[in-house]
Every structure is written in C-alpha cells, then in structure tokens.
Image (spheres, rainbow, N blue to C red):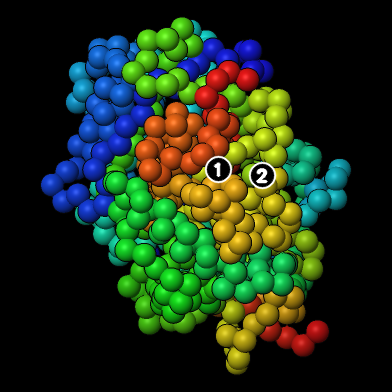
Amino acid sequence: MRDFYVNKVVISGVGESEIGRVKDKSGLDLCSDAALSAIANAGLKVKDIDGLLTSYCSTEPYFVFYGALAENLGLELDYGVTMTAGGGTAGMMINAAAMAIASGVAKNILIVAGENRASAMGSAATTQMLSAFSHPLYEGDGISVPAFYGMVAKRYLHENGLDRSHLAPIAVQSRANAARTPNAHKKDLITIEDVLNSRPIVEPLHLLDCCLISDGAGAVIVSRRDRENDLVEPPVYLAGIGEKFTHEHLTVAPDIVRPGANKAAKKAFDMAGITPSQIEFAQLYDCFTVTPAILTEELGFANIGEGWSMWSEGKAGIDGKFPINTHGGMLSHCHAGAAGGLLSIIECIRQVRGTQGDRQISKHDIGLAHTEGGIMSNHTTMIFTSSPL
Amino acid sequence: MYRSIPKSTGLSDHYRRNLEKGTILLQSCVPSAHIWHYPRPVCPECGSNNFSWIPASGRGTIASYTIVRHAPSAALKEELPYIVAMVDLKEGPRMTGTITGENALEVQIGDPIEVEILKDTSGQPGMPVFRRVSA
C-alpha cells in the first residue's frame, strides 16, 4: 500500500488565514487567504495548482464551494471536489489528495477548509445547526452534537471510574499551548478551577470542555514526490494513512466510546510499518476534552482508561515526553468547520519540519494527526515524517 | 425545530403508523437472528433483506445520558434542564430519548427503564420518553 500511494507524494506547503474573530472577511476570503499562503509556502505559483479539494463551507451561499474557490483564485483544474464528512473531512482530503497524486491525475493538489463561523453565524446559530445531528425520522431535534458527546463523556467516565475533574487538565494544557502560538484564537491562560467552575453545557461537559467557535481557514498542498528537492521549506512525507467509517448516528455505533479510531490507526501504522511507541508527538481531534483522552487510548499511546493522565502528569505539554496538540487544538487555537482538523494537520506538518522556533518540540521526526467527523463516525489517522520511512 | 422532517415513506411510514398506536417496531433478521433499530432495508449484521417486524417490549436499561443545561435552540430553553439518554432495549438495539418522572435528574447508567411514546401538541408521536422503573 505504501508504494502504491503514500510514497509517491510529498507535503509541499501549508498556510492559514487570520484566525479568531475576523469581522471583515467572508468564508471565501479566509479560504482564499489560506490557499495563497500555502501556495507561497510551497514555492509554487497559483497556476501550478491543478487539483483542489475543499470542505463544505457552512457560511457561504455557493452551491459548489470548490468551484467558487477555484474561480476566485483563477484556477483551471484537472481534479476537484467539495467533500462533506464533518470535522473528519480534513484527514479524508489528505487521503484523497494522496490517492489522486499517486494515480497521476494531478501534480499539485490544494486542500482548503475554513469558514467565518464566529462572525457570520455566531454561537446561537452554530449551536442550532449542530442540534440537527439526531436522526430526523427516528430521534427528536433536541439532541445536539454536544449532547451526543456529553453521553460519550458520561460513558467514558463511568466505565473508568473517573469524574470530570480528570478531563480538566486537557483544556488547561491546550490553552497554555495556544498562548505560545502566534495566530491562536484564545490565549488567556486558564486553571483547573476555571474549567471546573465554567458553566455546565451538557453534563459532564462544561463550557471550557468544549471547542471554540472561530473564524479561520487552513490549507495544505500535496505534490508529486519529484518536487521534494524544489521546496522552500523542508519536505514532509506521508508514511501511513488509514480511514474508518462505522456509523452516522451514535445509537448504531459498535461502541459508544470506542467505535472506530483504533481501526483507522491500525491501517496507518501497518502502512508505515511502525508501532505507536515510535510516534514522537500527536495532534488529536479535540472537539471536547473527552475526545483526545479516548484517542490516546485508541491509538495506542495510553492504556484503556488512563489516557487522561497524559495531561495531568504533564506528558502532553510542549516540553513533555509526548506533546499533544502543540498549537492548542480546537479547544483553544481554532475551530471553524473542517478547518479545526486541518489546522491540527498543518501543525503536525510544521512541527515535523522543525521550523517552529521557541515553540518547536525537541523530538519531531515522526508525528501523528487524527481527525474525526460526526459523532466519532469517521476517523482518519495520518503519520507524517521528516524523511521517507 | 431547525430542519424540516422528511416525509415518512416505506419502512419509516410503517414504523411511524405503529408508533402512533404506541408500539415501537424493531426488525429481526431471519438468517442471522440479529435485531435492529431504526428501520433499514437490510440487516446491518449480514446484509440480508429477509426480516420480520417485532414489537419492542419497551423495557431496557440506561447506556448513557447527559443533563442538558444549555439549550440548542430557543424552543428548548423552557425545557431546561432536560436529559437526553441512550437506552439499550431488552431486545438488543439502542435508542435515544428523554427521561421524565420524579427524580429524573438522579438517573444513573444501568437504571432500568420503560419507554413511552407521548404525543406532541399536534397529536403526532414525539421523541421516546423513558421512565425509570424498579428492576
């Protein structure tokens, strides 16, 4: 599998827009800014882009979003599509781009995700949009994405004899990491008490257990491997990638806490020919504090029921033994549609490059990123390396 | 309500007409004996389309729950706090609903429940309601 596709690609560029509350930009503006930043970062010209993958963009009225973005940038494409798989779209676009590059249909594929969800929709409209996650025919409309994750969190804590104080260090560490990241949405430091005392949303999850609602966009360029010597920044390689879908609605999931992340991860590890113990740091999807806690266990970085302790014991810090979400994740850096996951992939690529100055982690040759969509419905695990494995 | 509810057709219409009479129907696979909820054209275990409908007993246990303290829409604000729960029916399938009754907020995972289908103001069957019962 590795020779079939991941060995045929190189990550050539990454970029992002302004992040936070960006009042004077539309979702299309933010996506265009991120795209142009990634094209420059890759040492390419706009016209070198012959493939474009975008996520959905909830705040924009265009029927075909990738078409609107391509037109805005003046692109003529040999391959392009808008992909919709929730937050997991980010990882799935990396996989689709790698397959398309390896097949020869395109040479430089631009991947973009972003929205101005904070400014254009705001908290109330976003929450209401996310309340439409239950089955429209068989479940009521009062079950929001946060409520489903509230049930995931309750079950996780119950199965492992924990309470919500065990998850609080995840929010605190994310904020501390974001405070060191130039473009992060939230940088004011928080304490365990702040997390515990924040207002309840869907118990056991409180406000500071929940990801942000931000404006922002990210972009990645996947190129043919033969560009590896022509790059502006150090090349980054995709050593392994795996996807798994198990359910759309949580009632149908094979397990409320552990539906499919481990299956996606196994495929990525098998493709790369390495084990979890060889991974040096990870960027894990963190829509709520409970999510990365579960993922550390599912991906093989912690024993079942002990993932949370990676934060409370300091392992997950930037200077810790196994840094996690070094940019602050969606809890503190940015969450804007599928951009949150893509920005965690971008952070993984930047750390593998070794170019992050005073927030550069010390061991960074093999990094892992994991994105998921829906209610843990689809999973993509990616392993990025500084040299080909 | 944020989105419009699709028209019931075929399997979902059959399910809904029985729900109006107070019965939750499950599907039972003839070859694999797997029982599932919600209605779908083939068995999610083995892919067979050879199934029969069976009525759910309406009994089960709480698999997980959340106490909702922040309403996802203005309409639900008046209901706060309310509970969304997932229940494992005695027959096997899992379904979501709310929990009502005295001391609903004291619910625990594993509590036995009974399902009730209440009608909304327009007389249509609403979201399933779970009542805690003694084991």
Measuring 46% from the left and 64% from the top, which residue is drawn there? A172
Q: Which element is circle 1 on?
A: strand
Residue B76 vertical position relative to residue A141 in the rendered view, above or below: below
Is residue A282 shown to the viewer in this render? yes
Residue at image mark 2: A299
> Which mark identifies residue A361?
none
**Farthest residue, direction bottom:** B102
Mark 2 closeness class: few <14, some 14–19, many ≥20 residues within 10 Å: many
Measuring 32% from the left and 50% from the top, which residue is drawn there? A184
Q: Amino acid at mark 1?
A: Ala
Give whichever of discs 2 and 1 has the lower sequence position. 1
Rendering coords of residue A115 (x, y %): 29, 44
Chain assignment, label 1: A
Quadrant in the picture for the C terminus of chain A: top right
Measuring 36% from the left and 51% from the top, which residue is drawn there? A180
Quadrant in the picture for the N terminus of chain A: top right
Q: Amino acid at mark 2?
A: Leu
Asked where in the image residue B118 lies, by quadrant, the reply is bottom right
Rendering coords of residue B106 (x, y %): 62, 86
Q: Are marks 2 and 1 on the same chain?
A: yes
Residue A114 vertical position relative to residue A295 in the rendered view, above or below: above
Do residues under tags 2 and 1 come within 8 Å of each other at their CB atoms? yes
> Which mark identifies residue A282?
1
